[in-house]
Image (tube, rainbow, N blue to C red):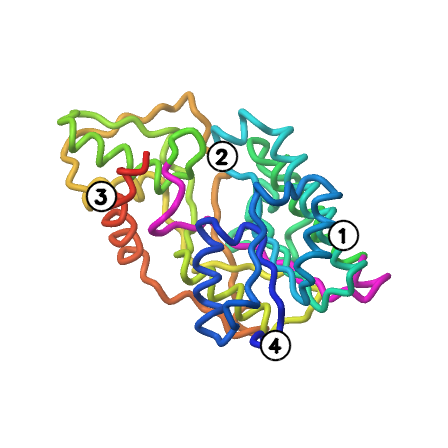
Amino acid sequence: MNLADQRIVITGGAGFLGRRLQACLLQRGVPPANLLVPTIDQYDLTREADVERMVETMDPTVVIHLAAEVGGIGANRASPGRFFYANMAMGLHLIEHARRHGVAKFVQIGTICAYPKDTPVPFREEDLWNGYPEPTNAPYGIAKKALGVMLAAYRDQYDLNGIFLLPVNLYGPGDNFDPATSHVIPALIRKFCRAVDTGAETVEVWGTGRASREFLYVDDAARGIALATERYDGADPVNLGAGFEITIADLAEKIKAMTGFTGQLVWDTAQPDGQPRRCLDTTRAAERFGFRAEVDFDEGLRRTIAWWQSEGRRRL
């Protein structure tokens, strides 16, 4: 697909990942007038009437569905019903009205939370249905996984060209640093920087530190989505990741050193670890559309910390 010839709607296009994806698509020759970003004040994508109006008004040939209600373990535990409903409703209405409108391609962004709790490492796409997700984020993960099933059904019945991508946890400058809803990297950066500023001697970290995670720099994720939109037309789900894992304990020590905090870590073991391990097999993305992560993890962390120290914390 020549993206420069398409009218591309990016739901969530004004967000953390969406802004990077817009920049990536512009670099790949998409005219600015052909990048269309619905905003919440214009369209509530959980309402079918708003989705129908958006599709008719913007007249896309491609829809890339990034918009989501999402957060870390605390946010998932606090709002499981809302996370299921909002994510299911948005995708449900968008896929149906993309089909009715004759959209040439629908790109659904799924989540690593869709995988079963005890998936063998590295996670392979064929393991997606081999168990129930980790309970703390299962409503969110199952809603997203159901949209993958919907796309497969619509491909079979209606010949809708829908692809389903499974990105691992993202991070980078401009991430969500709100302590109520942030993921682990921005949460730790904020805690350590605040401790340095206030002279605190300890920083509390949730869990035992034994769980592992994989992280993908946001610019790499945007490039992966652009490549898949351009080159991939298959029914199989595809992981997007960097192909490595790090324990939360090692991650905390790394961010502690990079932020200059010299105090002690206090582990709140009453809080959940979440999924025991996360690390993706990224072979399929490399084979199907030539995607490999490029940004070194330490370099990505340095950029993220520098952004928070120089700009981000002024916003919260």
Quadrant in which the N terminus is drawn? bottom right
> What kind of element bears circle 3?
helix
Q: Nearer the viewer, mark 4 or mark 1?
A: 4
Q: Residue tagged by mark 1?
A: 150
Badge 1 density bin: few <14, some 14–19, many ≥20, Cα 10 Å? some
State the separation of the CA atoms marked 2 and 1: 27 Å
Q: Residue at x 70, y 56 (%)?
A: 55
Residue 16 to residue 8: above or below: above
Quadrant in which the C terminus is drawn? top left
Residue at the farthest top position: 270
> What kind of element bears circle 1?
helix
Q: Nearer the viewer, mark 3 or mark 4?
A: 4
Are circles 2 and 3 on residues that touch, CB within 8 Å? no
Q: Earlier in the sequence, mark 3 or mark 4?
A: 4
Q: Report the span colored magenta.
A: 154-177
State the separation of the CA atoms marked 4 and 1: 27 Å
Q: Residue at x 84, y 63 (%)?
A: 158
Q: Earlier in the sequence, mark 4 or mark 1?
A: 4
Residue 253 to residue 195: above or below: below
Residue 203 falls left or right of residue 103: left
In this rendered view, identify the residue nearer to me: 85 or 164. 85
Q: Residue tagged by mark 3?
A: 309
